[in-house]
Amino acid sequence: MIDLRRLRILRAVAHHGTVTAAAESLHFTPSAASQQIRQLARELDVTLLEPQGRGVRLTAAARSLLEHADTIQALWEQAEIEMRDLGVVPAGPLRVAGFPVALARLLAPMAVSLLSEYPRLDVRILEAEPGPSLDLLFRGDIDLAIVESSPTAPPLSDTRFAQSPLLLDPLDLVVADTHPLADRDAVPLVETAQETWVLPPPGTTCHAHAMTACGAVGFTPQGRHQAQSWASVASLVAGGLGIALVPRLADLSPDLPVRRVPLRGVPAPARQLLVFTRAGARGHPAIAAAVTELEHIALDVVV
């Protein structure tokens, strides 16, 4: 009989990429985590991890085992819902996470609506970027996360999670109100190829969206300035230091002398927002109610 606790450690190694990170997430020492995986390998008479540089990689046997482990985890989520006899009325804790714009425009109104309808529900919201949100979801520390689609996001085939598209958030060109493009109704992105840009930091999903959108029309944006928050980006743009791509969901101060200019193109640049839960968990009444409410909000939130 396989010890499911050892499977949990192996799943964590696959998720985090190293034994050390997996051990830390589960509050084990690295040596204890390694010992548990070695014991699991002995029980199954297979090799699960192989050295790769200074780290390890999963063997084919480990990846095959993980497919079954993910199925077991999803079934456990469903069994827990049934055994707790949760009924159909959302109640109890609901822990959700999202990046700042998603929190402000989607999760906060979702919580207000759900709490007014279901007084026995306890909604708890955490601001977190997509990567940490998925780590928290995997560990069971949260129940739902809103993330941006990106090359590093889990694919639809990832059996650890259930995911569904929530909305497309168009990317607008933001320029100083004295810029030659400020009075245009719409602009093809290719017309900005020679402009100076304000870009999000490399490694962020917003940076990836900007590079992908510009690359799709044949140029790499030349960014002299980097800023993390949209408020900072808009302030730099207002000073005439560059132009930027800003999601339409992001609120900009009305006091700043900047203009949003829609981008023309087929398809127009946009980012896809996704709702993630653990596989097997969407039958939980509180989670199901949250997903439904988010879908309702998404119908009206982008114009």
Image: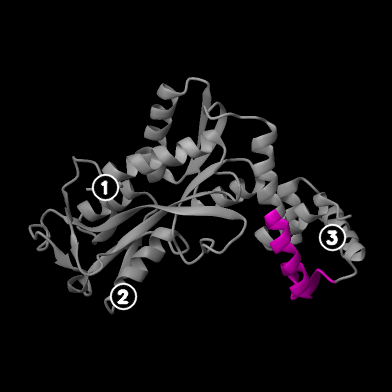
Q: Is residue 202 visible?
A: yes
Q: On residue 135, which mark appears?
A: none
Judge left or right: residue 139 versus residue 191: right
Q: Position of residue 293 (x, y in %)?
A: 40, 37
Please name the residue that numbered disc 1 is placed on. 302
The magenta region covers 47-71
> How much space separates mark 3 and mark 1, taking CA atoms?
47 Å
Residue 282: quarter of image: top right
- Label 1 element class: loop
Q: Which mark is residue 37?
A: 3
Between marks 2 and 1 in the image, the one whose residue lies nearer the viewer = 1
Q: Residue extending furthest bottom? A: 218
Q: Residue furthest top?
A: 119
Q: Is residue 220 visible?
A: no
Q: Residue 271: x, y in percent?
A: 35, 59
Can you identify the residue that label 2 sits on? 216
User: Which residue is at a point 66% across and 46% down the rendered structure image?
Assistant: 139
Neighbor class of circle 2 (other Cα within 10 Å; few <14, some 14-19, many 20+) is few
Residue at mark 3 to residue at mark 2: CA–CA distance: 44 Å
Residue 72 percent location from the top left of the image? 72, 53
Q: Earlier in the sequence, mark 2 or mark 1?
A: 2
- Relative side of 179 to 136, left or right: left
Q: Is residue 48 magenta?
A: yes
Q: Amino acid at mark 2?
A: Ala
Who's the residue at 48% across and 20% down the image? 119
Question: Hey, what amino acid is under mark 3?
Answer: Ile
Q: Secondary structure at mark 3?
A: helix
